[in-house]
Image (tube, rainbow, N blue to C red):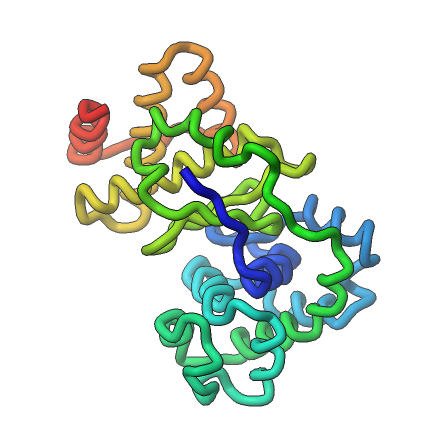
Amino acid sequence: MHVALASPHAELVFHVLAHVPCTAPSSLYDPAYVEWVAGYLGPASARPLGQDVAVLAGQSHAGAIRLQRYARVFADPNAARTCTTSPLKDVPTSALDRVDQRDAVLPSDDALEVLRCAVALELDAWRRLPPVALPTGFAHDLARWEALAPWLPRKPLVGLRSLGARGRLWDDAIWIGLPDGRVQLEEVGWQAAHEATLAEVCDAEALDEDAAERVSVALLAARAAGHGPETRAAHAVWVARYGALPSLTTREEELVRRLAALT
């Protein structure tokens, strides 16, 4: 299993979005991270970021995901800042790291252009934060969840400090937070296992987003229970952050049983 750090541009975009108040399930808003950043940079309200996040606040679930894809358009934040003089649709493909991700966030709107400007204006301040680093032995530590989430080694794992205890499943990677004192290894490990299980479920059967999430949580719970009371209790603690175990339809219960039997 291998874990790499996200690109600086991705880390910066998620840093900005972690400051944006939002109640959607896909929100990256993280008051603990905001407080940690303020300890180094002062409050966001004292920087242009304060006004920008107020404009971006309240995104829908789909809107938040679309803005997060901007993190994948560039790798170099300097290149991204240089390109803010043009609408994103007009930026030459040679300047982009992922043209497909640019296409995924278009057509441009006010929210996307505000995010681009916010990221560009926050770059110098963000650089004053401590450097992002992978914890020693992080990949080895995550391997303990492999028996519960067999798809964990199948997708590249990418770590972002600004993602905190959350995770993101993309078509070609799983993004996870980094244990750093604010966020514990247990939180990151279970979230990584969930994202890998979600990838497994989506590969096994065509489900809508909500159904895939329900089946993934239930499948991971079933596997955790099969590994003894301590593992079951640890998973229950992680689930409690989001509520109770979801109710499943008969079809979803059958899918859980079928996939659980494979491990």
Rendering quarter of residue 32 = top right
The percent position of residue 124, horizontal first and vertical second, equals 74, 69
Residue ranking furthest to the top: 229
Question: Compared to 145, does 225 lie above or below?
Answer: above
Q: Based on the displayed image, in which of its 4 quarters is residue 229 positioned?
A: top left
Which percent across, then down, holds residue 194?
39, 36
| Tag count | 0
Residue at x-position 21% and y-position 45%: 203
Is residue 99 among what the camera can see?
A: yes
Q: Is residue 83 left or right of residue 62?
A: right
> Where's residue 70, x and y in %?
49, 68
- Can you say which quadrant of the picture contains the C terminus? top left
**At 66% from the left edge and 57% from the top edge, which residue is drawn?**
19
Q: Which residue: 47% across, 86% down?
A: 91
140 left or right of 120 in image:
left
The N terminus lies in quadrant: top left
Q: Position of residue 108 (x, y in %)?
A: 46, 80
Query: From where the camera sits, is residue 214 visible?
Result: no
- In the image, is residue 31 above or below residue 127? above
Q: At x 17% / y 44%, what residue is drawn?
A: 205
Depth check: 178 or 250 in front? Answer: 178
Instruction: Give the image quarter of residue 123.
Output: bottom right
> Depth check: 233 or 120 in front?
120
Horizontally, residue 210 falls left or right of residue 174, namely: left
